[in-house]
Image: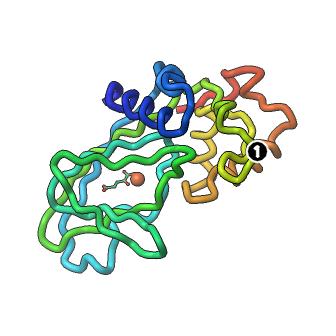
């Protein structure tokens, strides 16, 4: 999975016009997790959700699912079903903003999906590559301060359910903690307690 994710990172760098190996090198020591989701059948599927609407807070998600279907993505003001395909993968990432998605349940069949959440090493400092900071409307100036993945994870786990404004709220929270980021002075201070 890591090889696949690193390959996708290389493609994303190319598509952004960033130096090809930039993200591959950044994620070389990545710290990812895998989660198995199980959705039992439900007689009244229109009244429940398997997974409520959210955006994955990690850098890239590779989702493998069975053929039952249930994943939906919100675009252009509507929920769209993502038809399962034995060879297909779902993806979300940084500037390519994590998409709002959810999983509905099936009236008759159970469903399983396997999500691989690709994330940087905990003490890696996350900052945009200089090539993306032109200060124009396509590549605006910096919007967020430097942070480490461990501090971001702590914020997500303890204070905030990831949505479209996560980075905005996280930045405000981070700047309110201290004028100088503690995690940049001492990586141990930002380490996730789990
Ligand atoms: O099971 C699915 O289709 C989606 C699961 C999901 O969004 C997640 O695990 O973050
Ligand atoms: Fe998700």
Residue 101 image offset from top left, x and y in percent: 41, 61
At 25% from the left edge and 46% from the top edge, which residue is drawn? 64
Dividing the picture into quadrants, the one containing residue 80 is bottom left
Q: Report crowding for label 1: few under 14, some 14 to 19, many 20 or more residues within 10 A (C-alpha).
A: few
How far across and how far down the image is residue 71, in percent? Answer: 30, 61
Residue found farthest to the right:
179
Please tell me which residue is depicted at 61% across the width and 24% down the height of the picture.
Answer: 123
> How did the renderer colour the structure?
rainbow
Direction from residue 141 to residue 70 in the image, left or right: left
Which one is in front, 33 or 142? 142
Q: Count the marks: how many?
A: 1
Quarter of the figure with residue 46: bottom left
**At x 39% / y 64%, what residue is drawn?**
73
- Nearest the eye: 178 or 23: 23
Which residue sits at x=70%, y=26%?
189
Which SS class for mark 1? Answer: loop
In this view, 89 is above or below 146: below
Q: Is residue 181 left or right of residue 160?
A: right
Distance from mark 1 CB to nearest ligand 2 atom below 8 Å: no
Residue 142 in the image, given as x and y percentages of width and height: 74, 42
Q: Is residue 76 left or right of residue 160?
A: left
Q: Quadrant of the N terminus?
A: top left
Query: Residue 111 location, x and y as percent?
Result: 19, 58
Given residues 191 and 12, the one toward you in this image is: 12
Q: Which residue is mark 1?
A: 135
């Amino acid at each position: 999975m890591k090889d696949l994710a690193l390959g996708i990172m290389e493609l994303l760098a190319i598509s952004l016009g960033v130096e090809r190996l930039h993200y591959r090198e950044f994620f070389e020591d990545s710290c990812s997790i895998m989660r198995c989701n199980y959705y039992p059948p439900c007689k009244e599927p229109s009244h429940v959700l398997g997974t409520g609407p959210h955006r994955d807070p990690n850098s890239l998600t590779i989702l493998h699912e069975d053929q039952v279907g249930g994943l939906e993505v919100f675009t252009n003001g509507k929920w769209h079903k993502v038809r399962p395909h034995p060879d297909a993968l779902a993806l979300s990432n940084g500037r390519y903003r994590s998409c709002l998605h959810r999983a509905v349940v099936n009236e008759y069949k159970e469903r399983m999906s396997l999500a691989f959440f690709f994330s940087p090493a905990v003490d890696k400092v996350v900052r945009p590559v200089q090539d993306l900071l032109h200060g124009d409307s396509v590549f605006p100036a910096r919007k967020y301060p430097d942070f480490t993945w461990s501090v971001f994870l702590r914020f997500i786990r303890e204070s905030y359910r990831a949505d479209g404004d996560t980075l905005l709220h996280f930045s405000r929270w981070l700047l309110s903690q201290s004028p100088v980021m503690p995690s940049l002075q001492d990586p141990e201070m930002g380490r996730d307690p789990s």
